[in-house]
Amino acid sequence: MTMKELAKLAGVSPAAISRYLNGGPLSEEKRRIIRAAIEKTGYQPDPAAQSLRTRSTDVVGLIVPKLDSESVSRLTAGASEVLAGEGYACQLGVSLNDPEKEFAFLQLFQSRSVAGVILMGTVLTPGLESFFQNAQIPVVVAGQKFKGVPCVYHDDFGAALELTRLVLARGRRRPVFIGATRQDAAAGLARRQGVEAGLREAGLDAELPVEISSFEVEGGRAAMERLLARQPDLDAVICATDRMAFGAIQALKNAGRRLPEEVSVTGVGDSWAGEHVEPHLTTAHLYYKTCGETAARLLIDRINERDRKAPVRQVVLSYTIKERDSV
């Protein structure tokens, strides 16, 4: 009998069996259930395999783009809470928004035989696509929608569309967009497409002025300065993230624009700082902690599946518009 078979019989995860056998933290109820299953079956762990499990299978890799980000901290909190409840520890890899580093961490975690990986992804490169197709460990992507890969992502298109409708309802007719590179399917492409769809819906068919920004406040400020030079009569700025919006607000104030009387500004993400800047930022609240929790549950299900070719689950999360003073 294998550990997975014993776990199935006991109705617990393989990680819980491993922790029981190796003296790890476990609830008394789970200890009782596992002890009864072992007594019933006479299960004896293989010593070599048990040594390997002690080193690896209680660990899940979590790859994130950065640490100084509210979205990352909320997602990490959600994922780690669910994983800890199932007996897994997290090992963190920080990619610094570099797809090559994401790929390197995936290879590293696989070589160490971790139980699985949650990747807070950025850009789907050929290298990542090849890894997903041939991975020997379960991988779940959080925050992006990658074809053929288990993932949890946000309705980025819908959030940007609704924010655009809100701005246009205030009488704005010359909006601009600050976003990430289009290779970023969420913050770069889907949110931009949501804005463009809102403009078409309102009969505003002129090409949307766009500037690409980093994910930092300074990037948003620099992008806003370029847009002011290109289109000085702009009357709304729709930003792909809150940080970009904070930078845009700085640049607009420096240029003497009155907010929101002359220019409306929106962001995406609902950072805590949005309620403290002036004017308070209108934004779309994305459920990052729920994203982390859901990704962890998907990964646990994937770990426990015998058939790694089981149907791929992809979950889309909704959003809530937080209407404040900036429109």
Image (cartoon, grey):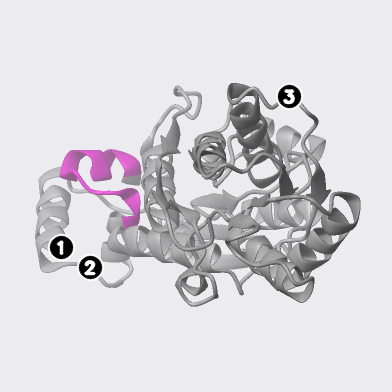
Question: Where does the magenta region start and end?
Answer: 4-15
Q: Earlier along the polypeptide chain: callout 3 or callout 1?
A: 1
Mark linked to residue 14 = none
**Residue that numbered label 2 is attached to:** 26
Asked whether the beta carbons under mark 1 and mark 2 sit within 8 Å of each other, the answer is yes
| 1 or 2: mark nearer the eye | 2
Depth check, mark 3 against mark 2: the one in front is 3
- The answer to whether residue 88 shows anywhere in this view is no
- 141 displayed left or right of 88: right
| Helix, strand or loop at mark 2 | loop
Residue 64 placement (x, y as % from top left): 61, 60
Mark 1 Cα within 10 Å, few/some/many (few <14, many 20+)?
Answer: some
Q: Which of the two residues, 29 or 298, is positioned nearer the viewer here?
A: 298
Q: Earlier in the sequence, mark 3 or mark 2?
A: 2
Question: In the rendered structure, does residue 136 fall within the stretch colored magenta?
Answer: no
Q: Amino acid at mark 3?
A: Asp
Q: What kind of residue is marked 2?
A: Leu
User: Mark 3 = which residue?
Assistant: 205
User: Which quadrant, please, contains the N terminus?
Assistant: top left
Sequence-wise, which precedes: disc 1 or disc 2? Answer: 2
Amino acid type indicated by mark 1:
Arg
In the rendered view, does 312 fall on the left or right side of 29? Answer: right
Q: State the image coordinates of residue 186 (x, y, percent, origin top left).
A: 63, 42
Residue highlighted by disc 1: 31
Callout 3: 10 Å neighbours few (<14), some, many (20+)?
few
